[in-house]
Image: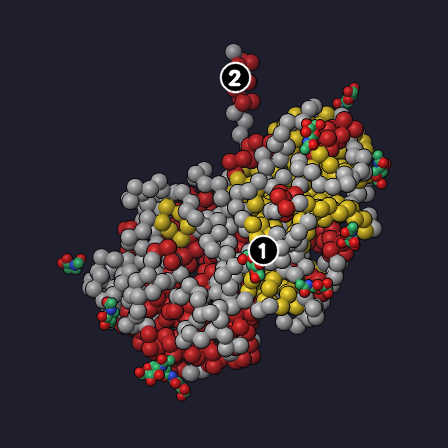
């Protein structure tokens, strides 16, 4: 009986998920082609489960630990290997920059710590296309311990065309480069890059001996299991089923010991910007891949210390602003938000005076620098480093200045297929005239107000004024058109777009001092609310359409910038109205986008929440948290999901959108409360000094953390 009870207790020993079990964990998430995840529901079987590209394609990435001669699979050993037993997963944790798994392997404990730095104020650190995996062993005192890891050519995305491997040594760093025999510049297969090099690297720790092997996975893994080391041999050519592998022999472990691996994807010509090759910003300092990788490994301690400070600041500030549910959402969003961006400079000159950032509309269509993707995400840039608003918009505005775009309204994106940022001289974008014209004015103003720099906006005033004029003439009697939510289809006379236009015009007026535009913006807002054009006759809610659709509604997210910038275009009464109304149309997982849709947009919902009273705001946060934690989802954070079962679909289930950077909008509450650079602040001179506000400190009493490089 007692034995039975004990057995039962052992069997139900639950894995600890800190802070929660999310749909999917970021593992190595740095740019659109280095985006590796593991679904939450696979974590209980981590030793035999494969990580995945954001699309869901398996990426071979295994880790095996060996303690006193016994081998334990820790990650990704999907095919059984003789004499390897699965370790037991004890806990899984995520922060803004880390995902950490703890496993029991006999008497030893292994920690797999995946660190993807988020350091937008440090352009070299942020642009390095690599991510860290650190494996730490404890509880194995005076036993012999070895740690093994491998990857394969699934990371190249084009295995069928042939793979080449190059093992290079720089100093103590051993580096595998895996590439295609016939790379296709700027091309993709199922969203994976078909040009460039996959890299996997490691170097001996102070106490380990590093060995390497490239060959058949079963052979290489069995070699490690038998001997605890590899042969340093390499096959002459790639065969299906091969891996490139490292083994660290730590000897008889005295204390906690760690080894670190770097995984990544290098594209020297990273972006095709109007026919010119752009490369990662880091190439200004490290012109070849081996030196970039060696620097990345050298930078580990500094990057990890900075990540720890950022993690603490985000979690404590988010909790203080809107509670632990909000913090859980934000921490899951940070890596994903930056993980769709490449920060670049010209490949030929390597001139750093004008960095350009490119962002992929991941999963929805692959467009480049979509304005209505940058817009929902902008609260995270505003909070962490508003220069990124400029870096992301500058490529678009420079293109507009070429005259290649001739429509009277703002362009939707800079190219239909990442990484081809080639513009739309054919005038064939996905038109969203009011949406994008309003967005660009709001974003340029956000940059100015957050940085105090008005010179950049001034360069483009004449272009911006054209779009402001377009809004003046085309808003109230609005043609049939799409809004950002293209899945909801086109409509004329959209209340939300008219509100966006009002805010955009006010932003343009503030930007330029041309108060006549502010006046038009104010008159639109006045018409919509006071005049009742955009509400039902009894003023209980904003409508989806005007003038005569009193039973329609849509979440009024376009009012967020009115609140953030303290424009006061819409009166307090209108926000009270929404706070009272939205809870009445709440589905099981929150408020859908609009009356005739059952799905919600998480980014817009948190924008909206920021404009509401605390009680309603918290309902929005809790509903999104419920979606994140309900166990029904396995994708990288989906910003679109079924919120209500009223049309017969299962509520709480993700829809279409995966891994999109729009989750940066989840920081809307933090951006509102903490203000520009409210958490982390730029390096002043050089890259050795940066300021991060510590927990509990106000934004203007920052501590200077010195980080040696
Ligand atoms: C290590 O393995 C040896 C041989 O199998 C065994 O005698 C010894 O007890 C083991 N040590 C520990 C600490 O488990
Ligand atoms: C292997 O890669 C290194 C570093 O990029 C390079 O210098 C070397 O030429 C490459 N070797 C081969 C055979 O391609
Ligand atoms: C980018 O453009 C190149 C050259 O036109 C083309 O080969 C490539 O397929 C394009 N990439 C994508 C992702 O469409
Ligand atoms: C890899 O090695 C295993 C075991 O020796 C063998 O069964 C398998 O056929 C090999 N795979 C390839 C592709 O050679
Ligand atoms: C592999 O290389 C390591 C590091 O240089 C060395 O210590 C080890 O003896 C080598 N192993 C073999 C089998 O040659
Ligand atoms: C070793 O690691 C364990 C588990 O993380 C930790 O509890 C312990 O304090 C560490 N010991 C030392 C000496 O760092
Ligand atoms: C990028 O720059 C490197 C180094 O100058 C050069 O070898 C390479 O051809 C360039 N790539 C492109 C696509 O221009
Ligand atoms: C706006 O409308 C006015 C009056 O009809 C017209 O003069 C002006 O050219 C229009 N401006 C734009 C940008 O369409
Ligand atoms: C749009 O609203 C304007 C202003 O109320 C109105 O004149 C026009 O008829 C509406 N258009 C449609 C298609 O309903
Ligand atoms: C606003 O005033 C400026 C300067 O007088 C003028 O150029 C512009 O056309 C006006 N725009 C509107 C919408 O009134
Ligand atoms: C508007 O309010 C009045 C007075 O409370 C009420 O009689 C009427 O039914 C309401 N109209 C609608 C459409 O709800
Ligand atoms: C988090 O949200 C859930 C519902 O989604 C709610 O039950 C719970 O009380 C919230 N937790 C906190 C700490 O607010």
- Label 2: which secondary element: helix
- Provide residue 682's location: percent of width, then percent of height: 63, 65
Depth check: 209 or 562 in front?
209
Q: Would you identify the image quadrant in which residue 559 lies? A: bottom left
User: Which of disc 2 and disc 1 is earlier in sequence?
Assistant: 2
Does residue 504 lie above or below 242 as drawn? below
Res. 566 mark: none
Depth check: 42 or 256 in front?
42
> Is any part of residue 501 visible from this angle?
yes
> At 57% across and 53% down in the image, what residue appears?
188
Label 1 and label 2: CA atoms lie apart by 58 Å
Depth check: 312 or 348 in front?
348
Q: Nearer the viewer, mark 1 or mark 2?
A: 1
Does residue 585 lie above or below 122 as drawn? above
Residue identifier under label 2: 5
- Provide residue 581's location: percent of width, then percent of height: 28, 55
């Amino acid at each position: 009986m007692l034995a039975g009870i004990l057995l039962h207790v052992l069997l139900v020993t639950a894995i600890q998920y800190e802070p929660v079990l999310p749909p999917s964990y970021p593992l190595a998430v740095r740019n659109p082609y280095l985006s590796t995840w593991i679904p939450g529901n696979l974590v209980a079987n981590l030793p035999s489960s494969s990580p995945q590209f954001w699309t869901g394609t398996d990426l071979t990435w295994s880790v095996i630990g060996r303690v006193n001669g016994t081998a334990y699979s820790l990650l990704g050993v999907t095919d059984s290997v003789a004499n390897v037993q699965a370790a037991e997963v004890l806990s899984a944790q995520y922060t803004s920059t880390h995902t950490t798994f703890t496993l029991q392997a006999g008497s030893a404990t292994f920690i797999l710590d995946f660190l993807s730095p988020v350091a937008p104020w440090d352009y070299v650190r942020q642009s390095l296309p690599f991510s860290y995996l650190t494996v730490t062993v404890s509880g194995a005192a005076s036993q012999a311990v070895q740690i093994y890891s491998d990857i394969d050519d699934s990371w190249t995305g084009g295995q069928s065309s042939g793979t080449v491997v190059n093992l290079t040594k720089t100093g103590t760093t051993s580096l595998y480069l895996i590439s295609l025999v016939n790379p296709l510049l700027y091309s993709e297969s199922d969203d994976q890059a078909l040009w460039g090099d996959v890299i996997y690297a490691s170097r001996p720790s102070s106490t380990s001996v590093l060995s390497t092997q490239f060959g058949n996975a079963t052979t290489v893994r069995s070699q490690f299991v038998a001997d605890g080391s590899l042969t340093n041999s390499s096959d002459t050519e790639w065969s299906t089923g091969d891996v490139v592998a490292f083994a660290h022999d730590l000897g008889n472990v005295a204390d906690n010991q760690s080894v670190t691996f770097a995984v990544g994807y290098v594209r020297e010509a990273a972006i095709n910007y109007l026919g010119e090759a752009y490369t990662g910003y880091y190439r200004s300092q490290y012109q070849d891949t081996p030196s970039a990788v060696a620097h990345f490994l050298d930078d580990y301690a500094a990057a990890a210390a900075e990540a720890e400070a950022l993690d603490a600041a985000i979690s404590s500030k988010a909790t203080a602003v809107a509670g632990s549910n909000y913090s859980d959402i934000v921490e899951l969003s940070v890596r994903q938000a930056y993980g769709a961006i490449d920060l670049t400079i010209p490949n030929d000159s390597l001139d750093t005076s004008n960095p350009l950032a490119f962002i992929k509309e991941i999963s929805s269509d692959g467009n480049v620098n979509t304005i209505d993707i940058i817009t929902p995400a902008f609260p995270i840039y505003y909070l962490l480093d508003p220069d990124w608003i400029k870096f992301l918009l500058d490529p678009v505005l420079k293109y507009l200045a070429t005259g290649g775009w001739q429509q009277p309204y703002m362009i939707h994106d800079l190219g239909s297929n990442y990484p081809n940022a080639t513009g739309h001289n054919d005038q064939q974008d996905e038109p969203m005239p009011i949406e994008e014209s309003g967005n660009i004015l709001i974003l340029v103003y956000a940059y100015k107000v957050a940085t105090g720099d008005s010179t950049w906006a001034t360069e483009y005033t004449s272009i911006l004024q054209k779009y402001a004029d377009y809004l003046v003439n085309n808003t109230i009697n609005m043609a049939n058109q799409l809004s950002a939510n293209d899945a909801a289809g086109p409509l004329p006379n959209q209340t939300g777009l008219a509100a966006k236009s009002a805010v955009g015009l006010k932003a343009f007026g503030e930007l330029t001092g041309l108060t006549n535009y502010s006046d038009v913006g104010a008159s639109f807002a006045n018409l919509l609310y006071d005049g009742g054009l955009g509400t039902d006759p009894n003023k209980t809610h904003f409508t989806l359409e005007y003038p005569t659709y009193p039973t329609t509604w849509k979440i009024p997210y376009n009012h967020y910038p009115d609140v953030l910038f303290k424009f006061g275009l819409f009166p307090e009464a209108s926000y009270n109205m929404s706070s009272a109304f939205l809870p009445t149309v709440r589905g099981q997982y929150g408020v859908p986008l609009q009356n005739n849709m059952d799905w919600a947009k998480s980014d817009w919902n948190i924008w909206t929440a920021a404009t509401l009273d605390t009680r309603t705001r918290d309902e929005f946060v809790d509903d999104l948290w419920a979606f994140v934690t309900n166990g029904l989802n396995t994708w990288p954070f989906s910003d679109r999901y079924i919120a209500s079962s009223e049309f017969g679909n299962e509520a709480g289930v993700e829809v279409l959108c995966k891994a999109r950077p729009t989750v940066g909008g989840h920081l809307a509450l933090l951006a509102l409360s903490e203000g520009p650079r409210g958490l982390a602040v730029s390096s002043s001179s050089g890259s050795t000094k940066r300021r991060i506000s510590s927990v509990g400190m106000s934004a203007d009493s920052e501590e200077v953390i010195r980080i040696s490089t």
